[in-house]
């Protein structure tokens, strides 16, 4: 009988520990998801603009982007048409 009680206590401790870790995970993911609105706007306005680059560098970036897109679609078997 004492072994059964010990087993149930260990299971209860494990359950409480798992619930606590789940709570911590939820709190940290919720806190990490919050960003100031101005940070998101700044990131969106400056995302991959090639206007200030020399034409040769901009062309290399465009070639690299096209190559990455082709690899992505080829690897997943996605037809672009």
Image (cartoon, rainbow, N blue to C red):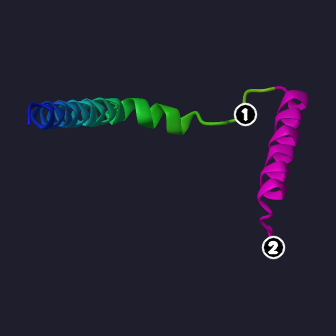
State how many labels appear.
Answer: 2
* Residue 55 among magenta residues: yes
Give the residue displayed 87% in from the left and 45% down from the top.
Answer: 67
Q: Secondary structure at mark 2?
A: loop
The residue positioned farthest toward the right in the image shown: 56
* Residue 8 among magenta residues: no
Q: Quadrant of residue 73?
A: bottom right
Question: Label 2 belongs to which residue?
Answer: 81
Q: Nearer the viewer, mark 2 or mark 1?
A: 2
Query: What x and y, as percent, mark residue 18?
Result: 25, 34
The magenta-colored residue range is 54-81
Quick check: 77 above or below 52? below
Q: Left or right: where does residue 41 sit relative to residue 55?
A: left
Give the residue displayed 53% in from the left and 37% down from the top.
Answer: 45
Q: Quadrant of residue 52?
A: top right
Question: Label 1 belongs to which residue?
Answer: 51
């Amino acid at each position: 009988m004492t072994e059964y009680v010990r087993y149930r206590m260990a299971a209860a401790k494990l359950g409480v520990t798992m619930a606590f870790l789940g709570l911590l995970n939820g709190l940290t993911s919720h806190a990490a998801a919050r960003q100031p609105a101005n940070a998101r706007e700044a990131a969106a306005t400056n995302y991959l603009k090639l206007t200030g680059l020399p034409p040769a560098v901009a062309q290399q970036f465009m070639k690299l982007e096209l190559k990455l897109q082709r690899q992505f679609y080829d690897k997943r078997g996605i037809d672009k048409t």
